[in-house]
Image (cartoon, rainbow, N blue to C red):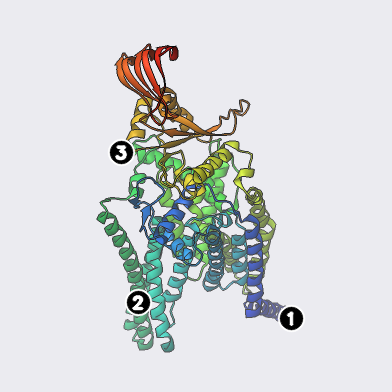
Amino acid sequence: MNNKKTETAKTSVLQKIENFSRNRFVIAILLLIISVVFFVNYSALYDKKLDMNGDNIYYFALGKSLYDGHGYSNTMYLEETPHSHFPPGYPAFISALFHVSPNNIQFVKKTNGVLLYLSILMLFWIAMLTTKNTILAFCSSLLASIHNDLLRWATIMMSETLLIFLSLAAILLTIIVVNWDFKPKRKWLLVVLLILLTAVTAYIYFVRTMGMAVILALIGWSGIMMLVSLVKWRKSIKENDAEQSLFLRNQFILRLVVAAALTVGTATAVLSWEARNQSIGVTGSDYKKDFLKKANGEQMSTKEDWIARFKSNSTNFIARWVPEATWFHKYNKDNPVTSGEWAKGIMLAALLIIGACYLSTGGLAFLFYVFLTVGVLIFYYEQYSGTRYLTPIMPILIFLLLSSVCGIFSFLYKITKRTSSPWILQTIALLIITFGVLSPTYSKQQEDNRKLASIKSWTSVNDRRMVDFIEACKWCGENLPDTARMMCRKPEIYYMYSDYHKSMGMPWAGEPDTILQLFRKNNLQYVIIDSWFRHGYATIYPCIVKYQDKFRLIKQIGEVNQAQQINPTLIFEFNDEWGYTGDMVDGRREGQGVLKMNDGRRYEGAFSANAPNGFGILYDPQGKVISKGIWQNGILVRPQ
């Protein structure tokens, strides 16, 4: 009897503690801790420098194009054309921010930080709705607040953070509406939430096509929940339970409306984007084309191609990249995947499933989202690899991993038929895993990005090739006209550092004659040759050497560094009117001709052995005669 009383007393005390953890004051304190941790870590990783990822510059330029009234166009390049690759969701978001603070990169990046912070708060809310476990919600959100990849992408002008925010918003809205309690006074709120869910769903697709994973996951889950309500409704009719039957009927209809709202939002976005692209003559999707690409430039065509891709990508995602995104496990990318890595990956997949099963609601939605995301990537072009493309599901991975801890203890309590709550053991385990295992690993993972953020300018880094290229872009912005037609290896970087001047990219390969025709076709006037990217010296420079009369060096940045194998960055002016026109024999200047020099002077007269030989006249840039007479190998030997 005493043992029973003692056990009851203990259970009562533990229940009070568990209930107290859900107290609004406690939750407020936990959210305050999460907020402080987030802002301390985000500030330490915040990098004021422009990220050299080309996509983030693309987003910026597209947002600027919308803001400047040029429409959704490629304004970085020599020829302005309508853009059709990236959906317009994130550039439109940037454009809206520009109306608050025009062309302010830092404002855009910091807004991404705010979006991540709000996403973390939503993760806390979702965890509370699905588990009612405050400690689980706290630990999940805290780990998301120090996750290196999440923080890093929130400091760059990229769509990842907006997609995370919208995806979690869609999940939260769907969970709330699917489990609606039908209180009469809240009908207006239900309508508002359904409209908001439809809008958020449509916007997700406009932000990233990959956002279809969360949309399809929510449609699938709400559809299953709709069928569950239908089955229960039919059963209640047979049992003549009028009140329950009415509730289940309303629940079935609402869940049907949720699935319809998700579908309508998606269909509206897809059809709108396709109609716009068709209006500018673009058919098909770049992402679909990428889906069929092979690493060597060929196309996927056989069953063996797909089997090979599945084996390669599934091995990397399951054994390496998903675990890296979750707990940053170490591996050597140059070595083949080990059986130990496979075991860790499979164990993580099992834990994610356990974590989803523990949730009181929405577990299937989370699983669908994770497995759809990874499943698409497994069959996608190998270029889209690594943890970057897992960024939108990283908060979900953290949450499900910690949820599995609670699920395991809950299962153990059930099979041992214990009557008390496993909450205290769950809490201890969560705190040990969060603060003893994952937090130190997450914090250590930040070290490189913290060091990078501490460097105030790219011109302070040790890579002289990158610094010289940036300096060349700045020089062009200060010294060349806005209308200058430039070729360089990275038009995105040139655009940002030349004060928004336009350019075109370089071909990866080509013979000198082919390159010369490219200069002529595009009416190019300038070219930057640099060591940061191989294409300048490997592809363009041979053309300059062969047709040196048509090029003039106007700026050299840096010197030759043989030890580091670094050449200077060179800026050449090109003028197709420079050089020789006249009689040729076997590719050599023979007979009468005109040689226009890049300093403005002009020689007219006889040529032999590829040089002025015989009578000729040399004019200055204004057309006045400088000298005339008999020339020998380019030297005036008998003036007249």
* Cα distance between the residues tagged 1 and 2: 50 Å
Crowd rating for badge 2 (residues with CA inside 10 Å; few <14, some 14–19, many 20+): many
* Residue type marked 2: Phe
* Residue type marked 3: Ser
Q: Quadrant of the N terminus?
A: bottom right
Residue 41 sits in which quadrant?
bottom right
Query: In this rendering, which labeled residue sits more in front, label 1 or label 3?
Result: 3
- Percent position of residue 132, x then y: 56, 73
Q: Nearer the viewer, residue 596 or 51?
A: 596
In this figure, which residue is indicated by the disc labeled 3?
301
| Residue plotted at (40% across, 57% down) | 65
Q: Is residue 457 above or below residue 72?
A: above
Q: Are marks 1 and 3 in contact (CB under 8 Å)?
A: no
All told, the count of numbered labels is: 3
Q: Are marks 3 and 2 in contact (CB under 8 Å)?
A: no
- Percent position of residue 363, x then y: 47, 65
SS of the residue at dot 3? loop
Give the farthest residue toward the front. 640
SS of the residue at dot 1? helix
- Percent position of residue 455, x then y: 65, 48
Residue 86 got which mark?
Answer: none
* Residue type marked 1: Asn
SS of the residue at dot 2? helix
Q: Is residue 634 above or below residue 563?
A: above
In this figure, which residue is indicated by the disc labeled 2?
252
Q: Quadrant of the C terminus?
A: top left
* Cα distance between the residues tagged 1 and 3: 75 Å
Q: Say whether disc 1 or disc 3 marks the residue closer to the N-terminus.
A: 1
Camera sees residue 422 = no
Residue 2 got which mark?
Answer: 1
Query: In this rendering, which labeled residue sits more in front, label 1 or label 2?
Result: 2
